[in-house]
Amino acid sequence: MVTAMFNELDPELTRAFARSREPLADAPFIANLLLRIERARRIRLRGQILAIAAVVVMVSLNLRLVLEGTAAAVRFAGDWSPTTMEWLVTPWGWAVSMLIGVWIVLRTRPSRR
């Protein structure tokens, strides 16, 4: 025995499917998206400028302490290093230090991780 099927087409569902087949309005979407991207970039740039300005102000307020600390560190390094280390300021010493620096940079680059 075969029973007849009911027509269960929902008019709202049919309209929703019809709307989904319509082409999307990409021009307003792209324009809105570009505006939001530009706004986010401006906000990020302002934040970076503000951070740099804050660092400059903090360093300028503490410049005497920073210079005294730097001078003390240089003085300590000068007193600590033995006089036999004069070869470090020769061209060979510079070449060796450059090789060590290149090796460190190559070992710590992000692509090695």
Image (spheres, helix red, strand yellow):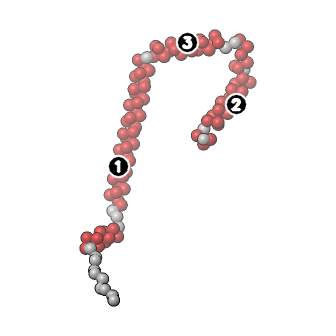
The image position of residue 80, as x and y in percent, is 65, 12
Amino acid under label 1?
Leu
Q: Residue furthest front?
A: 1
Residue 25 quadrant: bottom left
Q: Residue at x 38, y 31 (%)?
A: 50
Above or below, 76 relative to 30: above
The tag on residue 72 is 3
| Residue 22 visible in the current orientation | no
Against 35, residue 28 (above or below) is below
> Which numbered disc flags the more N-terminal residue, 2 or 3?
3
Q: Which amino acid type corresponds to the residue marked 2 in the rendered image?
A: Leu
- Are the two marked residues, 2 and 3, in contact with CB atoms closer than 8 angstroms? no
Q: Disc 1 marks which residue?
A: 35
Q: Earlier in the sequence, mark 3 or mark 1?
A: 1
Residue 99 numbered tag: 2
Q: On screen, 34 above or below 8?
A: above
Q: For the point 60% across and 38% down, which residue is it? A: 109
Residue found 52% across the figure and 14% down from its top: 69
